[in-house]
Amino acid sequence: SVTLEHGSKRLGKRTDPMMGVWRNYGLGQFIHWGLYAIPGGHWDGKYYSGAAEWIRSWNEMPKNAYDELYKVFDPKAYDPKAWAKQAKDMGAKYMIITTKHHDGFCLWPSQYTDYSVAKSPYNKDIIGPMVEAYDAEGIDVYLYFSVMDWNHPGYRSKLETKEDEEAYEGFKEFTRNQLLELLAFYPSTKGLWFDGTWDQAWIQQAAFADELEEEMRSVIPGLIIGSRFRADENGKRHFDTNGDLMGDYEQGWERKMPNRIEDVNGNDWDCVMTVPENQWGYHSDWKGHVKSSVELIEMMVKAASLDGNFVINFGPDGQGNIRPEESLIAKEVGEWMESNAEAVYDCGYLDWEKQDWGYYTRNRKTGNVNLVVFNYPASGKLRVKVPKGIKIQGIDLIGTNGGTIDLEEIHRDEYFLGLPKGTDHTKPVVLVMKIVEGDAEVQGVYEKAK
Ligand SMILES: C[C@@H]1N[C@@H](C(=O)NCc2ccccc2)[C@H](O)[C@@H]1O
């Protein structure tokens, strides 16, 4: 490996308590909200098929028309307490809010630009009340910040001239000022979720970004920052020139998931996921595949089974309403979590052979093994191979089902678990195994605790 001034600062996972809390979240909520929610994927009667929060980049929308939208930002329906309650009922343990997306509009009254809520008819801080409401529900808040800023005169995607370099110095100072301002205004934030850091200009700022990351970490000790913030001196992002992870967790899983434990390289990671195929900001007319709550529950459990967190995106409309499709998702995910959350919260990878019927997760606090069944076997029996010497002490069927499982040892260390007749398998079924290392014989099965 090569010596790097501005590469990864740590080998292996963070081991401090704040990262331990992050590792056990299981489920988060992303909120993309901003001026783009006003046009909601349409302009002048035309339909924008791109991601709604990118509508400013659409040729059919004049840039100055977009840049005037702040003059009509006045979300009468904005109710952060209701949003936080809904997120709580869904079972989200953390929330990531877009303080500033690529368009540069700030949802907080920044001292460093006029392009903020302070200059809109709404003329109040959006972020502060949201942080308070989510904190009050016990949901940790993370601040999304886009380095790319289409509004700032000093922003450049690449540095080609002396003028570019001078302008960009001003942009770098502005970026630092805004980040320090966010940490000062909202000190209860647990971390920053950076985006818009792929530009050539930015990945040439290894020293500046390294120093800024250190400075932010000194302002809020334990602050959690992912791999998407900065590049090393060779322009390498996410993983430095030696292949070591930048930041505290891998942030590359945007609208995609790892499939095997090898794909996560022993790192913490989160997957951020849209409900439609690719809409983060509000689009009034979703087209194509819209994920069901069962699909999202499967992704959430799959993430937990591979030592990651799963974050479901919400895009409130221009008035601050949560759209009906997302409210339904929140309700249905929450209903499932109500009786099955122990298979997700505090859970991670279990090195048992992957089975076709679904996923294993290991609860780090209880040591229990969870079997989360998505692909219900035609036989009604789950095949479970346990590692040599592991004996199943007892199994409990949790969730909405309950009931007795018919346990049959078919070979040494291999069992058929017969699910109770009439098990409702239109929803994922969860079995919890209490494992006793060593030769304890199978202690039989016990009814779900009523
Ligand atoms: C979390 C999402 N990231 C923003 C985005 O621009 N993604 C497109 C993209 C995804 C991966 C590499 C480069 C660019 C989207 O607008 C959302 O904010």
Image (cartoon, rainbow, N blue to C red):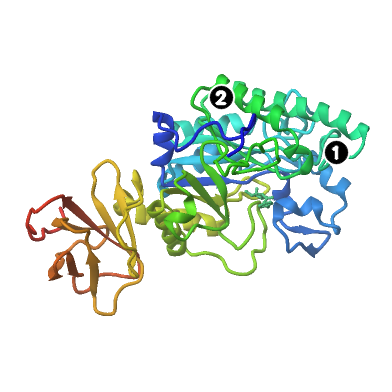
- Drawn side of residue 427 relative to residue 68, left or right: left
Image quadrant assignment for residue 196: top right
Residue 402 pos. (x, y %): 20, 61
In front of the other: label 2 or label 1?
1
**Residue 149 visible to an observer of this rendering:** yes
- Give the Cα separation between the discs numbered 2 and 1: 28 Å
Q: In the image, is residue 189 above or below residue 27? A: above
- Residue matched to label 1: 159
In the rendered structure, which amino acid carries the disc numbered 1? Leu
Q: Nearer the viewer, residue 66 or 74?
A: 66
Q: In the image, is 110 to the left or to the right of 260? A: right
Q: Label 2: which residue?
A: 217
Which residue occupies the foreground of this view, 138 or 319? 138
Name which quarter of the figure residue 77 lies in.
top right
Q: Residues within 10 Å of mark 2 (few under 14, many from 20)?
A: some
- Residue under the point 58% across and 42% down: 242
Q: Earlier in the sequence, mark 2 or mark 1?
A: 1
Report helix, strand or loop for mark 1.
loop
Image coords of residue 145 (percent x, y): 65, 37
The structure residue drawn at horizontal position 15% and vertical position 53%, both measured from the top left corner, is: 449
* Tag 2: amino acid: Arg
